[in-house]
Amino acid sequence: MPAERLRALEERTRYEPAEVEGRVFSRWEEAGIFHPEPEGTPEENFSIAVPPPNVTGVLHMGHALNGAIQDVCIRLARMRGRRTKWIFGTDHAGIGTEVKVAEALAEEGRSKEELGREAFIERVWEWRREHGSAIVEQYKRLGASLDYADERFTMDEHYQRAVTHVFVRLHEKGLIYRDNYMVNWDPGTGSAVSDLEVVQRHVDDTLYLIDYPLESGSGALTVATVRPETMLADTAIAVHPEDERYSRLVGEAAVLPLVGRRLPIVADEHVDPEFGTGALKITPGHDPNDFEIGRKHSLDEVSVIGEDGHISEAAPERFQGLPADEARKAVVAALEEEGLISGRQPYSHDVPHSHRSGRRIEPLISLQWFCDMNELARPAVDVVRDGQIRFHPEKPWTGVYLDWLENIRPWCVSRQLWWGHQLPVWYRGDETYVGEEPPEGDGWERDPDVLDTWFSSALWPFATLGWPRETPELEAFYPTDVLVTARDIIFLWVARMVMMGIEFTGKLPFTDVPITSIIQAPDGRRMSKSLGTGIDPLEETEEHGADAVRFGLLAMASTQDVRYSHQRVKQGRDLANKLWNASRLILMGVGEGAKPSAAAAESVEDRWILSRLERATGRVTGLIEGFRLSPATLELYDVFWSELCDWYLELAKPRLYSDDNAAVSGVLLHALERCLQLLHPVMPFVTEEIWSYLPGERGLLAVAPWPEADDSLIDDAAERALGDVIEAVTSLRRYRDDVGAKPSALIPARLEAGFAPELAAHIARLARFEFLAPDASDGDVFGTLAVPGGEVHVLRSHAFDPESARERLAARREWLGKEIERAESKLANERFVERAPSEVVEEERRKLEEHREALRRLSA
RNA sequence: GGGCGCGUAGCUCAGUGGGAGAGCGCUCGCCUCACACGCGAGAGGUCGCUGGUUCGAACCCAGCCGCGCCCACCA
């Protein structure tokens, strides 16, 4: 080892991520290991398409967790020798980006309307050139081994062609169509949005009871509504067909107050006779239910609220031009004047709001483009139902996915925005043209709308690889293997990728879908910028290191919702430091020319750690393969810290520091090497850094082989033997504490338990006892305690004070007494002895005997 | 309205039919020649409540209470 590196090893007693991470990342990038050549088949290769972050985005905890999980999968596959591609890119994020750039414009005192469409879009591209790379750098800070050399964007020219191609094909199949239909109108963004972009929020409203005079002049029909302003667009009244109160009125009509329109009274099952008065005003133009009822009964459709949120010319003149909420007041006032409000009551209910703008959704009839999902959904249901695509954990996500797809509804795909994929649709008079190339001839005007962002996202796993062209990348890496996401976009994204993947490539876009936790603020609230509850993963990385953040996130995230735990990240930081220091111990201690070796271990402790490592290797591999990363991470922590550091390193020290340390050096290097390999996917930086200090020419850890568990090294006898040693040491250490022994004093004692001499020596050293020969006559026996296989007679010495020792030992005896009682009563139960499996009964007998022995022998 | 998840040590969470676990925090003792981001030893829990199944339940079943999420066209 060069002197300079040796000095670094000797001097640095603390691992410093800030000093290491940039350097290590550069080594990976320079080696080009993140960018695979497109060769081989998708079966041999391994690929994941990253959920594309928004170009406008900054890395948040969700990305960090999601990225850490994917990187573990990618790094595992890469170490297993598979050609590995983690497809990278960003999403143009239609509404989000458009709003952001419009806000920037507003700060300059300009609006996008002033700028005009073309200049505005150019402005967005400019914005992307300036800010679009931020997220790239942020992923690098995390250590994500994405294929940065092949970055994609959903607005790339090729990607746009893929989107257009899909739209045109679906239109040809008749699945995409234009229709006047009830949509969710978002007054905030001035666009229609899909059902999935609507969130229900609780609203305290007033329920108004309004009298509608009957046409016959004999009385009135009272209806209940929370939106009196929509009455201006009423075209009927509905009652339940079996509601006897109203059956005689069906077929007659009422007169719409303020307007004078004749409203037929119809019967419809949808009406709940229990609610309100049992009579429902029907407003097909502004209510989704009423729209359906209206179509069923061929009612007129009147729209009085326009896309601008104001009352239109279809309403009486005095209301025209008012914003909807003011129109409500005006309508109520007018009705009151006529004495037609017969009641009002507070009413609290859920009301749809725009997920994007937060504004209350205005349901209205609008001419939009829709995609019929029924045909696309069917195969997407089948592949999940028969297990070709698997969610992890399977429950409850499989059911969630299937429920949604089995009740799917048409998807409104057009958006009244500028930034996005403009519809490949042209109009000329009554003609409509849909095609990948603009139509021939003059006078065509292109539809100004763009597609829902999720329409292009649905093509992500294959459009990023060049589809619909038959590119080498597509040949080599599609289908991908794993798709990692949180539950909130299972419908928006996952389901649609499955549908589009099957429809257009004939293949499943991926086979495994691990669903990640959603990280909440430490107090259990949502992490959000506006609430001020967000925690910046980059700040955490700066403070504790990327490995610490990765470890922490992976360790804390096991269930659906999890609170951010600073302690877990610190645990990761401590682990990185421990790795560094254990490595220093080993690397500074092993002899010149030592090589890792797991063969022919002579010492039982060597066979023990080798066996433990093989078991851990198998368990960790299985857990990662099952996407159970939290237990995998904690298992790694445990085997490295609690077994290797706490026990094996201590057991190995005497031999390591002796002249003849070749054998132990081999085992130590093997153990270190193994731990670094196993920990690398979780903590890539610190492991790669330490790897570079290991002896021999060995290249990058990131492409070193992943260890396969070797059962021939499993050694039950060694594990039992060391288990006894550990128990004996712990008992003796506790005894030291119990009797208040001086920390540095050796306690003289006689060990009578049949331990091999080497093991007895380990026990003595680790517990700071001095074992005298069994027949040694020097000293009085102060007391006795049980250890596995026998007992230890402790001699009187200056190491502790006998008086206080006696009191403390009484407590121990009491505990043993209780344990004996418990076991006795269990074994006295005949049915337990009869029916429980014999090994369970045997175990209980063994424990009883052990405790009886311990109590018999514990004396003072 | 329907569905799902959660309720385990002071905190954050594992465990999911056979003696209650981790990290942090706490107590006691240690600067022991890798690490005080450390070492050793401890204290701390009627595993939400009530019934049931079982020789045996934190774990399975039923009901209840509390918290959260998703879906849904009762105005």
Image: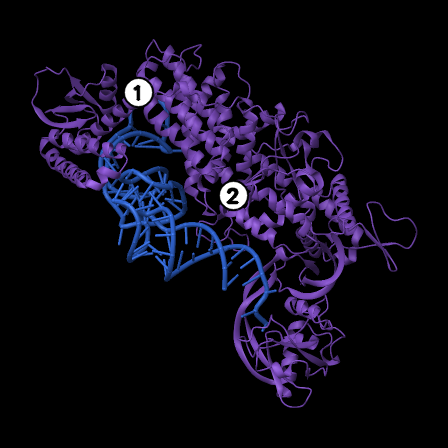
Q: Is residue A52 visible?
A: yes
Q: Amino acid at mark 2?
A: Thr
> Where is residue A41, by image quadrant?
top right
Secondary structure at numbered mark 2: strand
User: Residue A137 at x, y = what percent?
Assistant: 61, 37
Q: Amino acid at mark 1?
A: Ala
Q: Chain of mark 2?
A: A
Instruction: Give the mark nearer the N terminus: 1 vs 2.
Output: 2
Residue at position x 64%, y 30% in the image: A42
Tag shown at residue A516:
2
Q: Is residue A657 visible?
A: no
Quadrant in which the C terminus of chain A appears: top left
Label 1 sits on residue: A717
Residue at position x 53%, y 37% in the image: A68
User: Residue A9 at x, y = what percent?
Assistant: 44, 21
Establish if A629 lies above or below A235: above
Q: Which chain is blue?
A: B
Q: Which chain is purple?
A: A
User: Residue A838 at x, y = what percent?
Assistant: 26, 33
Q: Chain of mark 1?
A: A
> Where is residue A60, by image quadrant?
top right
Question: Left of A99 or right of it: where is A688?
Answer: left
Q: Residues within 10 Å of mark 2 (few under 14, many from 20)?
A: many
Camera-side residue: A19 or A484? Answer: A484
Secondary structure at numbered mark 1: helix
User: Residue A652 at x, y = what percent?
Assistant: 33, 18
Tag shown at residue A357:
none
Establish if A596 lies above or below A427: above
Label 1 vs label 2: CA separation? 40 Å
